Image: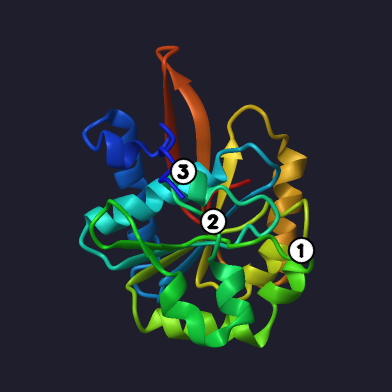
Amino acid sequence: MSRLMPKWNLITEINPKSPISEGYRMLRTNIEFSTINQKLQVIMVTSSKPSEGKSTTCANMAVAFAQANKRVLLIDADLRKPSQHLIFGKSNRFGLTTALFNKDELLKVIQHTNTENLSIIHSGPIPPNPSELLSSDQMADLLVSVREMYDVIIIDTPPILSVTDAQIVATQSDGVVLVVNSGKVKKEVLLKSKALLEHVKARLIGVVLNKINRNNSETYSYYYGERSEA
C-alpha cells in the first residue's frame, strides 16, 4: 500500500518555526511545569464533543515533546473513529487492536514517524467492543510495557461525552488534557465533561482552548493549568 500524504494540520512537523508551533511548545512547557513534583508520563487527551481538534492537538503535542528530545509514544485509542493514521499519512491495517488481541505483537505495531524520537501505535482495525478492549488486562499490560520504553506516552481517546472509552483510559493515565473548541462549547457541557473525569478520579491537568482566531487568519492553542475553571 502506498504511503498516504499527511494532512496539513501536523504543523509542528511541517513548519516548526510558525507561531502555531510555538503555541504547542508553550503547551508542552506548561504541562511539564504543572506537575513538576508529581509523575506525569501517560497523558490522555480528549474533548467533550467531536470536531473540537483533540486529535490534531494530540499529534502536535507528541511532536513537540519529541522535539525536546523526549522518547515519545503516541497511541491512537480512539477505536471508533481513529484519525492519527490520516494525520501522519500511515496505514491503519494494524495497531492497538492488533496488539491487544495478540499480546506478543507489541513491538510489531509500533511505527516510526518522520519526527526523531516519536513513535506511534495506530488504532488498528475497528473492533466491535472498544470499551471492553480498553478496560482489559491486555491494555493494562501494554501500558506497563510502554512506560518502560518511553519518557512520554500520549493517548488520543474519543470525546468523553460520547462513550465511556475516555473515562476508562483516564483511570490508567497520569493526567488528562481536555481540548475545547473556543466559543462553540457551552459551559454546562464542559462542567459535565469535568464531572465525568472527576467521577473516575482522573487528574485533569489542563484545558486547551482551540481554534482561537487571531488577525482572522491563524488558529492557536492555549494551555491553562489544572486550577482553571471549565
Write the residue at 57% across / 61% down: 123
Write the residue at 50% across / 50% down: 85
Which disc number belongs to residue 87?
3
* Circle 3 or circle 1, nearest the eye: 3
Residue 153, position as x, y percentages in the image: 42, 68
Residue 229, position as x, y percentages in the image: 60, 47
Q: Amino acid at mark 1?
A: Thr
Residue picked out by circle 1: 164
The correct choice, above or below, for 169 with respect to 185 in the image is: below
Q: Earlier in the sequence, mark 1 or mark 2?
A: 2
The correct choice, above or below, for 179 with respect to 34 in the image is: above
Examine the image and state in which quarter residue 194 appears: bottom right
Q: CA distance from mark 3 to mark 2?
A: 11 Å
Q: Amino acid at mark 2?
A: Asn
Residue 186, position as x, y percentages in the image: 73, 34
Would residue 134 appear left or right of 9 to someone viewing this image? right
